Image: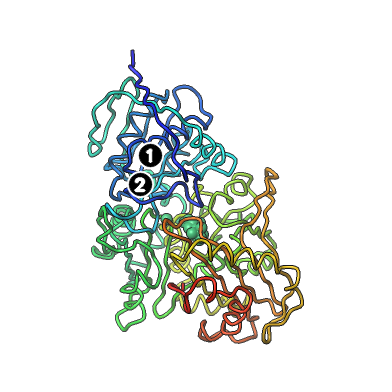
Amino acid sequence: MTQIVTVQTQPFDGQAPGTSGLRKKVKVFQQANYAENFIQSVFDSVTRDPGATLVIGGDGRFHNRTVIQQVIRMAAANGYGRVLVGRGGILSTPAASHVIRKYTASGGLVLSASHNPGGPDEDFGIKYNIANGGPAPEGVTTAIHARTLEIDRWLTVEADDIDLDRIGDVEVAGMTVSVIDPVADYADLMEELFDFAAIRKAVADGFTMRFDAMSAVTGPYAVEILENRLGFAKGTVVNGTPLEDFGGHHPDPNLIHAKELHDLMMGEDAPDLGAASDGDGDRNLIIGRGRFITPSDSLAMLAANIEIAPAYKGRLAGIARSMPTSAAADRVAEALGVPCFETPTGWKFFGNLLDAGKVTICGEESAGTGSDHVREKDGLWAVLLWLNILAARQIPVDQLAREHWARFGRNYYARHDYEGIAKDGADALMAEIKDSLGVLKGHAFGPLTVKLADSFSYSDPVDGSVSENQGIRVLFEDGSRIVFRLSGTGTQGATLRVYLERYEPADGRLDEETGAMLADQIVAAEAIAGIVEHTGRTAPDVIT
Ligand code: G1P
Ligand code: ZN
């Protein structure tokens, strides 16, 4: 008989899952009962059959192994029949999604704080994914949060830590734990989706790339797929070994944290493609020789060309983008005669649309792109789709971008982040814009006249659930737009995100500098929100 140990506990404040699960400093997770309370709240809230399978994996950051051992013991005590865990505790977020689906698990716990830094003084996170492989929808996260507020005990078994580095099955208090190869299933899936032969041929003909794994989870995946299976030269993948502190860097694939890659791509010795992924492997950065592709544009360009890839031929059903993502994808959807859905920020809102077959590809301005192959955004998938398209069309990234804009027009786009600002000021800023929504309409800010201003609310076309207060949209007569929202993933103070966009039609100014093109929108954003006054900042901390 399995001896279940019941440990008394008390609720902690602030265990409401945010945009991507529960994300806090490692020190917070290290408190007695903290991680256990949250994990038990998940196990108490989610439905599953007796003897169900649970997938566990993480991005390899500091504290990953500790929490994995905790989860294994608690899963045994909570009646799971089997746990699948990636060797070394590793599973990229998209690989975890695939493993949940492939082995019909009841769900999975993904341990990551995505692109946030790792280490004893940095960030950690736990996210629950449901049986479709995607992040738990709001109904589930609300139930988990409610449970954290009243939890008074958690369950575990007395068992030693298992050897996470040895592939194979072991038993923990009557439950089977299978340590699996974290890469193989995912790499096989990629090989089914894309024309590897065409990419291999392009490589043999001299196509070159650099992939920066940022010392995070995608290293082993990228080495296996790009170097071993596609034939790119050894050394194409840089920073390919996952480190607990990501080498002290932010594993965030943007122009600030992947500056070295950006500089290489803008220089004389640039390869044909530069790409990077984040801490847990769900984000992507795409840079052609001399040409950075914004994530919003990448979504639009991939959607316009997706049917080149074998698994997508003849089946682009629709496109979805998060509200702050530029409308570049909308232009493609319109031209191709497929629907385009505008959802709140966060991948969980795409799940229902993908499950219902309403969309095939989806994306966010924050470097997330994915499709119906899993239920998470997928960094390497986006890189491989780019590779497949470039191999088939045999044109450089820059030319592809120019041809795209000449057909659909160009959405100049930037995001300004004000990080770690006081929460009071951030809340006041949002509250004041909300109060002024009624009078904004028709108001002119320089050359920009407000056409519509609202607080974005989303009604899910599949299950009818409504999500309110998902950011403020200010749309102007000329098709440009400003969006204000507060981040749901930060671990310190508040982060204000201001999203700026301007549309130039196909016969307009297509080859200008983004900052200059958005000057009027930047002035209008300050006039509407009083950013300097509320945040005490005269400039954003990060522009992406
Ligand atoms: C951020 C991004 C959002 C993404 C999320 C998880 O959330 O903006 O698009 O889904 O990270 O990767 P935010 O901090 O804005 O709430
Ligand atoms: Zn991520």
Percent position of residue 542, x then y: 43, 72
Whether residue 76 is situated above or below residue 416 in the rendered picture: above
Identify the image quadrant of the N terminus.
Answer: top left
Cα–Cα span, label 2 and label 1: 7 Å
Amino acid, disc 1: Tyr
Whether residue 23 is situated above or below residue 237 in the rendered picture: above
| Camera-nearest residue between 266 and 146 | 146
The answer to which quarter of the image holds residue 118 is bottom left
| Camera-nearest residue between 43 and 9 | 9
Mark with earlier residue (2, 1): 2
In the picture, measured across the screen, residue 434 lies left or right of residue 266, that is right
In the picture, measured across the screen, residue 323 lies left or right of residue 243, that is right
In the picture, measured across the screen, residue 384 lies left or right of residue 146, that is left
The answer to which quarter of the image holds residue 231 is bottom left
Dot 2 falls on a residue whose secondary structure is: helix
Percent position of residue 302, x then y: 53, 64
Q: Is residue 45 shown to the viewer in this render? A: yes
| Camera-nearest residue between 366 and 488 | 488
Amino acid, disc 2: Val
Q: Name the residue under label 1.
A: 34
Name the residue: 44% across, 75% down. Answer: 292
- Are circles 2 and 1 on residues that touch, CB within 8 Å? yes
In the picture, measured across the screen, residue 379 lies left or right of residue 296, that is left
Percent position of residue 400, x then y: 50, 75
Mark 2 beta carbon near ligand 1 (under 8 Å): no
Percent position of residue 190, x then y: 42, 51
Q: Name the residue under label 2.
A: 28
User: Which class describes the residues within 10 Å of circle 1: few (<14), some (14-19), or many (20+)?
Assistant: some
Q: How many labels does the image show?
A: 2
Dot 1 falls on a residue whose secondary structure is: helix
Name the residue: 68% across, 48% down. Answer: 466
